[in-house]
């Protein structure tokens, strides 16, 4: 199975800050990497697919980059409504696997 | 609009069974593979299983293989998860999620989830 190591597990930042989350795969997954936002009691929401493509309707302050084993997710200017847990997910191989999640809070 | 609505969760004793359902609407259900993903209390997301668009192929996480069975009824636009021999560690919110790729059948074509349900809570406890 492909292990996805996500860091940090949590972070606290101020409104307007740039926030960066990293995800490392245990083997080369090319660009088969997606990012989701999950708020408590809600359905997870796809933000980024194929490492860097913004899902339709998702605000442009969210972005992703990377390939191979190392990936980055960025919120360019943190807003109060961005409080959530963010997950990376690989689809190079079954089983599909997620990173452990990053809980983002407002300082 | 696309909707996925899970049902069937509840409290069940260890070793017993439970069947979850996921009712789909707003898209052509029979074209897409559908997944089950779960989240245990205080934990992250865990992929559980996927069934191909026509039900011919099914894949499972090792943690549920041999105990859980995924199935679908395309005439009713409904997905199922039959859970047997339940354990405390199966306690979680279970989500159904639609795959973005149509007509995906082999294990190498599943990709990402463009729509999710709100989830149904399964609690395994004596």
Image: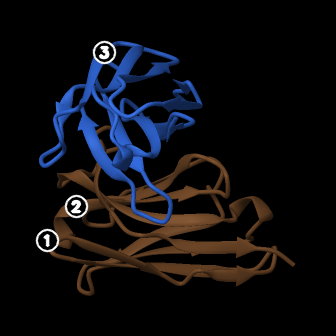
Chain colours: A blue, B brown
Name the residue rendered at 49%, 66% in the picture: A41
Q: Which chain is disc 1 placed on?
A: B
| Disc on res. A16 | none
Q: Position of residue B95 (x, y in %)?
A: 46, 64
On screen, residue A53 versus residue B71, left or right, reads left
Per the model, the C-alpha gap separating discs 2 and 3 is 28 Å
Q: Tags 2 and 3 in contact by the CB under 8 Å rule?
A: no
| Label 3 residue SS | strand
Is residue B18 at all visible to an observer of this figure?
A: yes
Residue B119 x %, y %: 47, 70
Compared with A26, B2 (above or below) is below
Tell me how far mark 3 sits from mark 1, CA to CA.
33 Å
Residue labelled with disc 2: B32
Category of crowding for the residue at label 2, using alpha-carbon neighbours closer than 10 angstroms: few (below 14), some (14–19), many (at least 20): many
Where is mark 3, residue-wise? A66
- Tell whether label 1 touches label 3 (CB within 8 Å): no
The CA distance from mark 2 to mark 1 is 8 Å
Residue that appears at 36% across and 75% down = B72
State the residue position of label 1. B28
- Asked which quadrant contains residue B73, the reply is bottom left
Circle 2 — which element?
strand
Q: Secondary structure at mark 1?
A: loop
Instruction: Return the chain for callout 2.
Output: B
User: Which residue reaches farthest right?
Assistant: B126
- State whether residue A68 is above or below residue B123: above
Q: Chain of mark 3?
A: A
> Image quadrant for the N terminus of chain B?
bottom left
Residue B34: give x, y in percent of width and height: 33, 61
Q: Which residue is rendered at x = 70% and y = 73% of the image?
A: B123
Q: Are marks 2 and 1 in contact (CB under 8 Å)?
A: yes
Where in the figure is residue A38, as x and y percent of width and height?
43, 51
Q: Are marks 3 and 1 on the same chain?
A: no
């Amino acid at each position: 199975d492909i292990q996805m190591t996500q860091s940090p597990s949590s972070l606290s930042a101020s409104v307007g800050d740039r926030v960066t989350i990293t995800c490392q795969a245990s083997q080369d997954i090319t660009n088969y990497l997606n990012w989701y936002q999950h708020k408590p009691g809600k359905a997870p929401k796809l933000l980024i697919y194929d490492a860097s493509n913004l899902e339709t309707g998702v605000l442009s302050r969210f972005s992703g980059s990377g390939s191979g084993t190392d990936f980055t997710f960025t919120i360019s200017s943190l807003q109060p409504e961005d409080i959530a847990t963010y997950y990376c997910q690989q689809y190079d191989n079954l089983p599909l696997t997620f990173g452990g999640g990053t809980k983002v809070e407002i300082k | 609009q696309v909707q996925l609505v899970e049902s069937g969760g509840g409290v069940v004793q260890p070793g017993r069974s439970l069947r979850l359902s996921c009712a789909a609407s707003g898209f052509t259900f029979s074209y897409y593979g559908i997944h089950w993903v779960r989240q245990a209390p205080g934990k992250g997301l865990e992929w559980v299983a996927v069934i191909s668009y026509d039900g011919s192929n099914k894949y499972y996480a090792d943690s549920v293989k041999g105990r859980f069975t995924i199935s679908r009824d395309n005439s009713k636009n409904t997905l199922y998860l039959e859970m047997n021999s339940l354990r405390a560690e199966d306690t979680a919110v279970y989500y159904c999620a639609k795959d973005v790729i149509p007509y995906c059948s082999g294990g190498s074509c599943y990709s990402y989830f463009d729509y999710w349900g709100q989830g149904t809570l399964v609690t395994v406890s004596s």
